[in-house]
Image: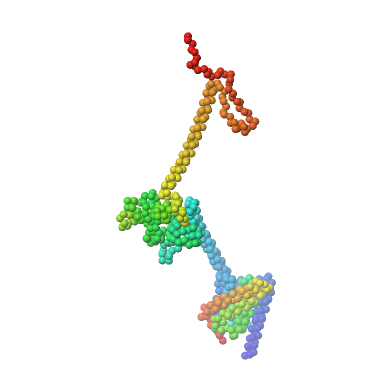
């Protein structure tokens, strides 16, 4: 990835992060869009797995510091998701919107799974409801929003397909 | 190359493990230990994002508050509208109840559902929620508290359809309030608001009706009983008819406001409705009733006066008798004892029985003409 591509990716990620802290509170949906996951995946596929893990860790720390959730849960989940996204990019990631959408859906659901299990520390019906109802819904919404964001921001970035 | 790749993989794995370990440490940290880290992040690196989030939440709160305010004002407005509608409905129901109590019998209450043909912009008929099961028959008059609405056209078992006075088929024999002018009421052929006006046709030329004169059904023809209010005269219409006059009428009833009506039964039509709509057309019966009422009042007054006169005469008579007796020196006879009271009140002193005074000289029974006069 050249410098221009890196700057563009950083810019898009910054936009997505800003959207996460502006649009998401405005919408306040029960199954909300997670722009941080979109930003994480967008950056991770352009980084080595280790760097992607660090990127995810930092993004997770940002999320943990602002949210009321247990500190470190988002960092852990995002580290794993970022690493996995970067590791699997050669297998899955392609210039295909539907595949990108599925990838986003999966990433968000895995993130929620790790985040909720680590954060709750106990399995109860509410957790199950969250994992099997609200998380898939939020993942679907995130996938749709991510695909839309990628389509809109496509001119800004250069997708690495090799 | 392979060594570099292997090294890279190891570095990646090491970084992942490091991140995971750090994250787990953060997770297991106690609140008092993790809070300073989070707080430091919020004050430094994440501060702009915190500001953005706070601003967005503030916007959201303002939006929700304005939405709630709007909803509250809307609900107040809706409540006001509903209240107004309820007041109007209540007023209409009061009127219909009043009409029902004035009619007393021979009517069927029904709710009116307006309908109009798609091509028409004027309401010409209405569906009534009462049918033949309730006693509604074809040609039964449909009335409202204000006056005539229309006539039943078809009567199904549970519902019926009535044509309004706006229908081209509507006719009613009518007359002025003082019963000096008669004619036939037709719907006025106009557009817009004029479509709801009426025409009184066939009034003789010699009879002139002033604007504002009330028009009632005349009872001729047998469809409508005499005395249902139809409307008031607005003006005279110029026609080519030389021998008759035509007048424009403003109907008493606005069809759009009619929600509840009364259907007069055939028996009631035959018997008449009396002075229910307050028309002078029923002055005959009204006058009779007034005269009868006056007669009864006069009779009562006469009776009372006679009784009073009788009582006064009695008292005068008693007083005269008493004074005469006093002047003659006779014992004053007490009032006639109430023998019944005396009988029923034991222990009370009986009044002394007046016996004839035998010591007094008797009345001279010798005829004066038989007394021999002294010759000296």
Q: Quadrant of the C terminus of chain A?
A: bottom right
Residue B189 at x, y = what percent? 37, 60
Left/right placement of residue B310 relative to residue B31 reads left
Residue B49 at x, y = what percent? 58, 72
Residue B98 at x, y = what percent? 49, 52
Q: With respect to residue B124, does B325 lie above or below?
A: above
Q: Where on the picture, by quarter, is residue A119?
A: bottom right
Q: With respect to residue B18, does B317 lie above or below?
A: above
Is residue B110 shown to the viewer in this render?
no
Left/right placement of residue B41 relative to residue B128 reads right
Q: Nearer the viewer, residue A51 or A84?
A: A84
Q: Quadrant of the N terminus of chain A?
A: bottom right
Query: How many tags in the picture?
Result: 0
Residue at the spot x=51%, y=30% of the render? B314
Q: Nearer the viewer, residue B288 or B210?
A: B288
Residue at the spot x=48%, y=35% of the render? B305
Is residue B7 shown to the viewer in this render?
yes
């Amino acid at each position: 990835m050249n410098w221009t591509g890196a700057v563009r990716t950083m810019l898009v990620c910054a936009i997505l992060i800003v959207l996460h802290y502006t649009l998401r509170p405005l919408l306040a949906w029960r199954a909300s869009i997670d722009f941080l996951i979109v930003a994480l995946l967008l950056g991770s596929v352009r980084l080595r797995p280790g760097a992607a893990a660090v990127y995810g860790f930092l993004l997770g720390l940002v999320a943990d510091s602002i949210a009321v959730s247990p500190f470190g849960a988002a960092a852990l989940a995002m580290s794993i998701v970022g690493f996995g996204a970067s590791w699997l990019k050669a297998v899955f990631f392609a210039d295909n919107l539907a595949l990108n959408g599925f990838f986003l859906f999966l990433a968000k659901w895995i993130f929620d799974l790790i985040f909720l299990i680590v954060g709750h520390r106990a399995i109860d019906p509410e957790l199950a409801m969250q994992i099997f109802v609200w998380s898939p819904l939020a993942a679907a919404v995130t996938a749709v929003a991510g695909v839309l964001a990628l389509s809109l921001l496509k001119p800004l970035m250069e997708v690495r397909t090799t | 190359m392979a060594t570099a790749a292997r090294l890279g993989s190891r570095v990646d794995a090491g970084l992942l493990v490091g991140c995971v370990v750090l994250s787990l440490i953060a997770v297991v940290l106690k609140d008092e230990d993790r809070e300073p880290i989070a707080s430091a992040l919020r004050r430094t690196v994440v501060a702009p994002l915190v500001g953005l989030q706070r601003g967005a939440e503030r916007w959201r709160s303002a939006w929700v508050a304005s939405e709630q305010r709007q909803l509250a004002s809307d609900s107040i407005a809706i409540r006001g509208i509903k209240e107004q509608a309820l007041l109007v409905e209540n007023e209409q129901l009061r009127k219909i109840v009043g009409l029902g109590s004035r009619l007393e019998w021979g009517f069927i209450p029904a709710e009116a559902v307006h309908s109009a043909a798609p091509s028409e912009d004027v309401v010409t008929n209405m569906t009534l929620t009462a049918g033949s099961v309730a006693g509604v028959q074809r040609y039964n008059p449909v009335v409202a508290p204000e006056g005539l609405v229309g006539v039943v056209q078809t009567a199904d078992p549970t519902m019926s359809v009535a044509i309004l006075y706006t229908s081209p088929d509507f006719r009613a024999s009518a007359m002025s309030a003082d019963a000096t002018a008669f004619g036939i009421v037709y719907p006025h052929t106009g557009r817009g608001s004029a479509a709801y006006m009426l025409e009184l046709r066939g009034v003789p030329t010699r009879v002139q009706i002033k604007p504002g004169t009330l028009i009632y059904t005349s009872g001729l023809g047998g469809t409508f009983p005499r005395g249902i209010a139809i409307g008031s005269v607005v003006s005279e219409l110029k026609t080519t008819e030389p021998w008759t006059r035509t007048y424009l009428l403003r109907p008493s009833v606005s069809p759009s406001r009619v929600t509840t009506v009364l259907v007069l039964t055939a028996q009631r039509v035959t018997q008449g409705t009396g002075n229910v709509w307050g028309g002078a057309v029923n002055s005959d019966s009204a006058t009779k009733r007034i005269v009868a009422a006056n007669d009864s009042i006069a009779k009562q007054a006469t009776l009372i006066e006679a009784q009073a006169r009788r009582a006064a005469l009695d008292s005068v008579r008693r007083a005269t008798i008493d004074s005469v007796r006093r002047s003659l020196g006779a014992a004053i006879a007490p009032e006639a004892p109430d023998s019944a009271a005396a009988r029923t009140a034991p222990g009370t002193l009986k009044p002394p029985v007046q016996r004839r005074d035998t010591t007094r000289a008797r009345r001279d029974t010798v005829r004066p003409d038989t007394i021999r006069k002294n010759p000296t």
